[in-house]
Image: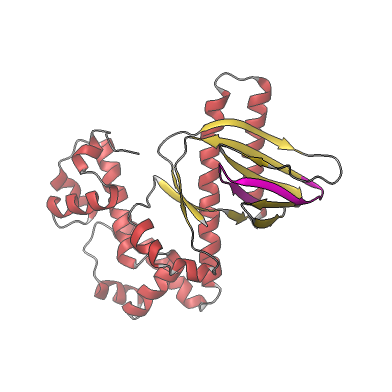
Amino acid sequence: MQYLCSLTTLPHVSFMNYFSPKGDWIHFRRRNVEYIMYFIAEGEMHIQENGAEYVLLPGDVFFLQPYLEHVGTRPAPCAYYFVHFSNLSLLPFDYGEGTALEIADHQLAEDTVDSVFDFEHCMLPKHIRVRDEAVRAQIASLFDACIEQGRSGAKHYRVFWACKLLEILTTLAQNSSDARAEAVGSALPSRTMGKIQDLCAYLDTHYAEKITGSIIEAEAGMNFDYLNRTFRRVTGKTVFQYLNRVRINRVKELLKTTDMKLAEIAALTGFSDEFYLSRQFKKATGVSPALYARGQMKN
C-alpha cells in the first residue's frame, strides 16, 4: 500500500508528541477519525489494522488509516513519536505484496501516478523502514522541534506543526525513493547505475534542448531501448516521462515568477511551441497554463 500525498495545502494537526510507557505496553483498541503517523524510536510495536498485522521496529514509520480498527496484538517495550492529522489528501494505491522492482514496474505507477506526480505531490508507502541513521535523526529532530513549540505555547504553534509535518513527509518520500532505487540498483552492474545517474543529471540540465533517443544513446554510449527499460526500473518512469516532468516543473516556475508569454516559456523549456506546451501542461496538471498562472489550480 502506498499513498499519493498532495503537498499543496497545510494539514490540520491535532496532536503531536512522544510517548514512552514504562515496561511492556500493548496498543489499545480504537477506530480513529484522523490519519495517525507513528515513528518508532525504541523497542517494537505489534499492531493490527483491519485484520492485517504489523511489527514496527526502530526507524519504522507507519500510517494508520482513519475509520479502520486498530488494536495491539502483544505487549512489548516501545517508545515512539506520533502525529494525528487531517485535511491532507492521501490517495491510497494498493500494489499488494511485491519487491521494489515489481512496484516500480507496476502499470499503475506509469499510467496513473506519473500523470499527476510532480513537486506538488509525493508517494508515501504505508510502512516505511528508515535505515539511514542520519535520516532517522533528522525526523526525530523535526518532531522534537514541534513538541518543544507545543509545550512552550508558542504563538501559532499548530501552523509550525503543519509546516514541519510536510517537511517530515517529503523527507520520508525522498528516503523511500532512494531506498527503492538502491534496491533495484543493487541488482544492476555499477556501470549501468552510473549511466542512469549521469542521464538524470543530463536531463535536469539540458531539458531546454531538443532531446531524442539517438541523442541520449550517443550521450550514454548505451543502447537506448535497454537504457530506457533500466531507467524505468530504477526511477519508476521512462526517460521521456522523466524529461517531461522536468520541463513541466520548469514551466510552472516560470508561470509563477514571470510574466513571460507562453511562446517564450516554450522556447526556454524544450517544447516545440506554445500549443504543444499547453497540451502537455494540461495533461500533466489538469489545468491550462493560463489558469495555473492565475493561481486557480484546484488541489
Residue at x 81% of width, y 50% of height: 75
Nearer-the-camera pick, 272 or 78: 78
Res 89 quadrant in image: top left
What is the image's colouring?
Answer: secondary structure
Asked whether residue 63 is drawn in magenta, I would say yes
Residue at x 82% of width, y 48% of height: 77
- The quarter of the rendered structure image containing the C terminus is top left
Q: Position of residue 256 (x, y in %)?
A: 28, 37
Asked whether residue 44 is drawn in magenta, I would say no
Task: Report if residue 137 is visible in the image.
Answer: no
Q: In this view, does 115 lie above or below 240?
A: above
Q: In this view, does 130 lie above or below 260?
A: below
Secondary structure mostly seen in magenta is: strand
Judged left or right of residue 242, residue 22 is: right
Which residue extends farthest right? Answer: 23
Res 52 quadrant in image: bottom right
Res 280 quadrant in image: bottom left
Nearer-the-camera pick, 113 or 289: 113
Q: In this view, does 150 lie above or below 269?
A: above
Q: Is residue 78 above or below residue 214?
A: above
Judged left or right of residue 73, residue 242 is: left
Q: Where is residue 289 in the image (x, y as percent from the top left)?
A: 21, 43
Q: Where is residue 129 in the image (x, y as percent from the top left)?
A: 63, 57
Judged left or right of residue 223, residue 279 is: left
Residue at x 25% of width, y 75% of height: 214
Residue at x 42% of width, y 64% of height: 236
- Write down the region rendered in magenta: 59-78
Q: Position of residue 114 (x, y in %)?
A: 36, 58
Task: Report if residue 216 is visible in the image.
Answer: yes
Label count reads 0
